[in-house]
Structures are given as C-alpha cells and as structure tokens.
Image: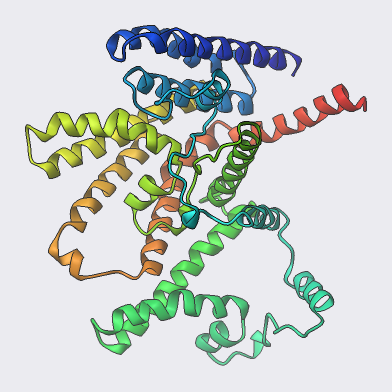
Amino acid sequence: MEGETISLVIVCISAIISTSYCYYITSRIKAGVFRLLFVLPVCALFHAFPLFFSTLHISCCVSIFLAWLASFKLILFSFDRGPLFPLPSNIFRFICFTCLPIKAQQNPKPKNQIPKWVFPIKVAIFGVVLHRNYFDARQTFGFITLGCDLEPQFNEPYLATSLQDYWGRRWNLMIPAILRPAIYLPVRQLCRGRMSPDWARFLAVMATFIVSGVGHERKLSVNGVCHWSKNNETMTEITQLEIVLMLVKLLVFIILGCDLEPQFNEPYLATSLQDFWGRRWNLMVTQLLKPAIYIPVWRLCNGRMSSDHARFLAVMATFIFSGVAHEVFFFTLTFEMPTGEVACFFVLHGVCTAAEIAAKRTEFVRRWRVSPTVSRLFTVGFVVMTSGWLLFPTAARSNMLDRAANEALLSIDFFKRTFLYL
C-alpha cells in the first residue's frame, strides 16, 4: 500500500500540472486541430496513469476519471465544446471539472431536482440490502417500535387445498400483496381489451410467476446458492456507484459552491432503452459521447442518406465506441485479453436502442401505448438480464470481486497502522 500511495501522489501531481498546462497554454491557442495537437500528449499521459497501479480500486478510479472522462473533456475542449467550454473562471475549477466526473449545472431547474432526503434513504436501503434480516426479526422490531400488530407472513401453508390457495392466500403473504397490484393487475388490465378474460388472466399469472422467478434467482445469487447469476450484483453495484459519485459531488459542491449536474437520474425508472442510456444512466458519459461521437457521425451521414439511416449509424457508432472503450477499460484492470463479450453487450444494446427509436416513429406504436409500469419492468429486466449474460462474466472470470474485497481489507489495515497506530 505504501507504494500505491506514493504512485497516487505522483499521478495526482502530474494530473494537476498537465491540467494547468491546458488551462494556461492550450486555452490561448485557437480552437481546432492545432489546439488538439497540444492536448493529445496530455491525453496520452492520462491513459498511461492506470498502468502505474496494481490495486483494483485506485486503477479503476484513475482509469475512469483521467484516462477516459478527462481525456474526452480535453479533446472536446480543443474544439470549444463539452463541459470545459466556456472556460471556467479559475484554475481550481478547471482542474476539478477536468479530473473529476462532474459538470457545473448551466440552467438549474429546482422543480425537476430530486429531493435531498432521497440520498440518505438510498444509503439506508443499501444498508438493508447488505444486512438482510429475517422475517421474524422485522416483525418483532415493527411491533416494538410501532406498538401495533402486524399481518402474518404465512397462513398455515401446510393446510393449502390448491396451488392457487397456497401461493395466493397462505405462503409469504407480503409478496403476493406486492406482486398483485404491481404485476398481476396491470398485465391483466393491459390484455383484457385485446383477448378473452381467460387468456388475460393466464398471461397475468405467468407474468407474476416469471417476475417471482427472476426475483428468487436474484436472492439466491446474493446468498451464494445460484450459480447462474452468482456475480450479477447489478442493483448493489448501481447503488454503490451512485453513493460514491454522490459523495464526490457533495464534496466538490462544498468546495466550489456551485450546483453540479447529477450523475444518475433514477435509472430504475427508465421506460425504454433510449430513456435509460440517454437520460438516466451515467449522464456524464452521455454528455461526452453525444458531441464527440453521435453528432459528428450524424452530420457526416445526414447529407448522404436519409435522416433515419443517419440516426441509426450515429447510435451504432456511439455504442460500438462505448463497447470498445469498456473492453480497454477491463483490460487495464485485469490485463487479460478481451473476449469481446463486453463489446457485444453494447452492440446489442445499440441495435435494440436504434430499433426502438425507429419503432417509436411508426404509426402502430404511436397508437398502441404501453403502461409505464410494464415498460419499466421490461426495460430494467432487459438491462439486468443482458448484463448478467455478457457484461459481468468478464469480471467474474478475473476474480475482480474477490480482489476488491481483499483490497478493501488491506486498505483498512493500512489506515489503522498509519493513522491510528493499531
């Protein structure tokens, strides 16, 4: 850890010097290719920084913050675009906006901002996920704190006279009470006007049990029983990432005293892949890829083909670039040859997103509106399933989760010995 700490200090000082060079020297050069020539050496240096570390956490942060986000910001800055244009008022802000995954909010909209109390609630939910309690402990705690009787979790399931009686009125009653209004009733209501009541009821029952099956796969994977998605820690990782970035945002807000744009916008509420990737997930990357990849490709193709074909190629180019970038990112963390699975994940989502955009423009889809609840279920389910299929196996084969856990323990021990003398 001592060597990693020294390397981190050297990298931080080098990044500050390089960013200061861009602020004082390259900013005085006319925007365009000539300024880009002076910026590219800094980008190359930023891409070399992750190779200085063997620790997964530090290498991951340096790779995301400097090698990719900072490099993209500086390249866009060469053409007077991106989050660094217009030029920040002082060098300190320029360094922060370049080296950290943040962006100053240009036109704040208080009415659309998420309430401040959402963050502590997410932290509490994350703690509940980590410390999964048993049903009886929750019930006892609720009775002691609230002073009222709680409904039972089970109703003598061994006395069930049918499967409908067992699943609907006796077994784990809290789950049916949630799944019925969340899945069963919306699906039945959606199908009732398009088919007979019996078929609508059949599809509603099947949808409920499918969701329950996926949920149980998730629970078993958390407890280490299910090997199909053992490493599919999607919701936990999303919550971890959002909490870490929220802490960075809070720290920079205290130091700089300006509003920052959010990193995520409740991605679990996405109603389509376009909504998920374009307006909810990892917004800093979206804001960089749109002017760097999407718009140039669209402008290049728009005069040579129809607008729909140009939009399709622009979307595909953006997702292909993102897939290649993620392959390189995983390589810098694991030093294992890429398998192409991560790139295939983004290519698949690019094809599906482009097809979704094209389908939305058809008359059939405009008339046939899907319930937001159903669309959210299918969107988030598709992202989770494809992530478990293509994205997370790469991390599982390289034992990244085990490395991260071991490094966390070593870091705690290092700080104890260094600062607490224990």
Can you see residue 48? no
**Of all residues shown, which one is farthest toward the right?**
422
| 58 or 306, nearer to the observer | 306
Asked if residue 306 is positioned above or below residue 220 in the image, the reply reads above
Q: Position of residue 381 (x, y in %)?
A: 42, 58
The N terminus sits in image quarter: top right
Q: Position of residue 129 (x, y in %)?
A: 66, 56
Which quadrant would residue 191 be assigned to in this image?
Answer: bottom left
Q: Going by the image, does 269 lie left or right of 123?
A: left
Can you see residue 390? yes
Q: Going by the image, does 147 lie left or right of 81?
A: right
| 132 or 288, nearer to the observer | 288
Q: Position of residue 110 (x, y in %)?
A: 50, 53
The C terminus sits in image quarter: top right
| 401 or 358, nearer to the observer | 358
Q: Residue at x 13, y 41 (%)?
A: 309
Q: Position of residue 103 (x, y in %)?
A: 48, 34
Q: Residue at x 43, y 43 (%)?
A: 107
